Amino acid sequence: MNQAFAGIGSVSLACLLMAGMVTAQTPQAGTARPRTPAAAAATVTTVTVPTDYVIGAEDVLGVVFWREAEMSGDVAVRPDGMITLPLIGDVKAAGMKPDALRDAIQTAAGKYLSEPNVSVVVRQLNSRKVFITGEVMMPGSFPLTGPRTVMQLIALAGGLTEYAKSGDISIMREENGKTRYFKFNYKDVSKGKKLEQNIQLRPNDTIVVP
């Protein structure tokens, strides 16, 4: 009897050991798995860009080459509108849409790589800015990452000071080499009157609060 029980115990112990080995080799739920360069890049922060977006100076772009990790990375657009990539060198980026830049990089990379596969994503949107100056609490530049009205920018700037001439605010906009002026009466708009003055801002608009 004792030998029989010993045999059963040995078998049970062997089963437990084998089960432990299987458990150790099987990833638990939620355990990270190795990722391809493209999958890893997809987890890095990107921003949603407007439909009319074109790349500009100071924007940060992620350039990802499939299966070419050493050529992948984030690059900032220089003031001259260029970016520099390993092996390829300088590439003009400013004034282009991300898809157009991707095609240009892919064509340039074709001289050095066979069938290059490239993705371009926007990490930081720094080129689209609007400005507010004069009698507000925090004058300066603000990023224009989405639709924003005059009233919203004034709020972002901390509101008007007690000395502001709220009925004589103007918006300056450069169009085709000429400066256009739009009038804005803060008191009227804040009371729900003449709401057409509360226009959506465009990149490089400047609000002047006298």
Image (cartoon, rainbow, N blue to C red):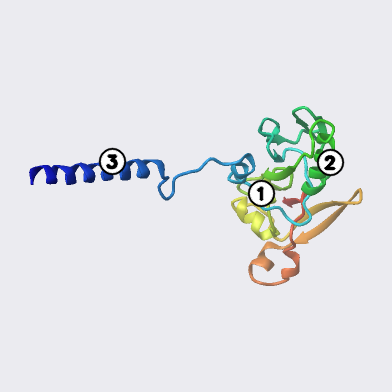
Residue under the image location 72 percent in, 44 percent down: 119
- Closer to viewer: mark 3 or mark 1: 3
Q: Is residue 19 left or right of residue 162?
A: left
Above or below for 102 versus 88:
below
- Do tag 3 and tag 1 residues touch (Cβ < 8 Å)? no
Residue annotated with mark 1: 135
Q: Nearer the viewer, residue 92 or 200?
A: 92
Image quadrant of residue 187?
Answer: bottom right
Residue 167 in picture, x, y percent from top left:
71, 61
* Residue occupying image coordinates x 71% and y 35%: 76
Label 1 and label 2: CA atoms lie apart by 45 Å
Q: Which mark is residue 95?
A: none
Q: CA distance from mark 3 to mark 1?
A: 76 Å
| Mark 3 → mark 2, Cα distance in angstroms | 58 Å
x and y percent of residue 146 in the render?
Answer: 69, 56
Disc 2 packing (10 Å; few <14; some 14–19; many ≥20) = some
Q: Position of residue 41 (x, y in %)?
A: 62, 42
- Answer with mark 3 or mark 1, whichever residue precedes in sequence: 3
Specify the quadrant of the image occupied by residue 61: top right
Q: For numbered disc 2, what is the local secondary structure?
A: helix
Kindly identify which numbered label has been placed on residue 104.
2
Figure quadrant of residue 154: bottom right
Number of the label disc, if any, that sits on residue 17: 3
Q: Residue furthest left?
A: 1
